[in-house]
Amino acid sequence: MRVAMIGTGYVGLVSGACFADFGHHVTCVDKDAQKIAMLERGEIPIFEPGLDDIVARNRAAGRLDFAVDLTAAVREADAVFIAVGTPSRRGDGHADLSYVYAAAREIAEAAQGYTVVVTKSTVPVGTGDEVERVIREARPEADISVVSNPEFLREGAAIEDFKRPDRIVVGTDDPRAREVMTQLYRPLSLNSLPLLFTSRRTSELIKYAGNAFLAVKITFINEIADLCEQVGANVQEVARGIGLDNRIGSKFLHAGPGYGGSCFPKDTLALTRTAQEAGTPLRIVETVVAVNDVRKLAMAKKVVSALGGEVRGKTAAVLGLTFKPNTDDMRESPALSIIHALLDKGMKIRAFDPEGMEEAKKLLPAAVTYTGGAYEAAEGADCLVIITEWDAFRALDFERLRKLMTQPVLVDLRNIYRPDEMTALGFAYESVGRGTTGADGAAIHGA
Ligand SMILES: NC(=O)c1ccc[n+]([C@@H]2O[C@H](COP(=O)([O-])OP(=O)(O)OC[C@H]3O[C@@H](n4cnc5c(N)ncnc54)[C@H](O)[C@@H]3O)[C@@H](O)[C@H]2O)c1
């Protein structure tokens, strides 16, 4: 089949390359001419493990190409995917749908023959109706179906997620569109893939409800972590103890600095707005949004208290800037809020991230010093702060670090290390939700 992918970002490029790998012919389109030029030169504009290989292979096989203008690709396509960004709208937190509707208008002009227009971007309930209205208004005679097919891939494991998904949700009541979508995903059905057909509105809501549920889970364990610190309990053991219950499950129960990234923050916020407008506020999700916002600042306070409360002129070596490992995505990363707060308190920041520093430079003040690795970052630092759990930070040489640092203090916001080990190595150690009790059984706020 022929596919046009409109928007060649994290989702569009991964989905396009994977559809090509299934044997379809795919054109990935993007308005950003620089991005397309890079791809045509064989360069990958984002960091996503394995993506370079799959793009190169499918280009060489003649199944994947790139374009700035969508006309030719849409004209020939059986399915046109809209995979453009849907960021938070400034001011009110609604999803900004201007890119989606702009793409729909362009698709309307170019479509020929029966075309399934598939919204892969995360969009609020009812957006499919509006996309259909926009296209029909521009081209009343166009033979199109508008389908919802939200994407569930995770950055850092995107190819694996796309090729081995837990489920594929397709929102349409139209049998012709259903057939096209089944053909597109057929290569996956060999692995008895759970293809879930729903109405368009239900499909749109499944994506938001899924992300909101995961954000609730993360925020729940983060609050339990705070309680653990106060009462002398260990959040990792609590998480294991509840996660072994199949009804709960062990995923998304890692206490940390709060969720970030390109999806959870904007999607939870947009869902609360949709619900408020529908007259059925989602109070749990509203609370999660508020709790997560203050959490990032609480993490900066943790650094300050680990250094005894007075930090002006002191230096923090920050390891990990991206919102999670194996991506260069800095959108809404907790590192942004934490570093801003530490700079406001007069601290100096020496940072290192394996992939995120180019993006970080665009978002953080010029005062931040970027370094070539964990040990260089640690030179002269008063504390080491681990914000993102890249593999490169999992087996640090603390003897070496101690010699490089002004004082041996580690704030481990991902609970990578063990408090007893760190103490034995002579480090003052702070982590998340691992409270301890003294000889008298009273809680000691600490590691
Ligand atoms: N990133 C993720 O992990 C993820 C996962 C699931 C769903 N989503 C959703 O997928 C959508 C895309 O996310 P992303 O992270 O890939 O965004 P992105 O910002 O990386 O990419 C979007 C691309 O669309 C391009 N674009 C915008 N308007 C265009 C137009 N009219 N024609 C052609 N190109 C256009 C932009 O130049 C940009 O390259 C969002 O709705 C997001 O919520 C993202």
Image (spheres, grey):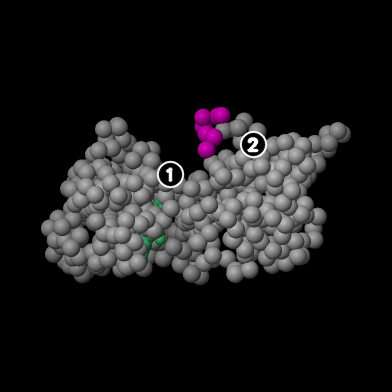
Q: Residues within 10 Å of mark 1 (few under 14, many from 20)?
A: some
Start-end of magenta stretch: 244-251
Circle on res. 236: 2
Left or right of 296 in this view: 406: right
If you read the primary sequence from the N terminus, does the residue marked by circle 1 or circle 2 appear first?
A: 1
Furthest-right residue in view?
440
Q: Residue at x 66, y 61 (%)?
A: 349
Q: Is residue 385 above or below residue 111?
A: above
Using the image as rendered, state which of residue 9 and residue 318 is in the foreground. Answer: 318
Amino acid type at mark 2? Gln
Report x, y in % for residue 276: 48, 60
Q: Secondary structure at mark 2?
A: helix
> Does the segment drawn in magenta span residue 104?
no
Q: Can you say which quadrant of the picture contains the C terminus?
A: top right
> Does the segment drawn in magenta span residue 245?
yes
Report x, y in % for residue 277: 45, 62
**Mark 1 and mark 2: Cα distance apart in space:** 24 Å
Using the image as rendered, state which of residue 341 and residue 294 is in the foreground. Answer: 341
Q: Is residue 374 above or below residue 93?
A: above
- Marks 1 & 2, CB-CB < 8 Å contact: no
Q: Quadrant of residue 235?
A: top right
Q: Residues within 10 Å of mark 2 (few under 14, many from 20)?
A: some
- The residue at which mark 1 appears reads as 157
Q: Quadrant of ligand 1?
A: bottom left
Q: Nearer the viewer, mark 1 or mark 2?
A: 1
Report x, y in % for residue 127: 34, 60
Left or right of 269 in this view: 145: left
Q: Residue at x 37, y 48 (%)?
A: 51
Q: Residue at x 53, y 49 (%)?
A: 324
Secondary structure, magenta segment, majority class: loop
Is residue 269 visible to us here? no
Amino acid type at mark 1? Ala
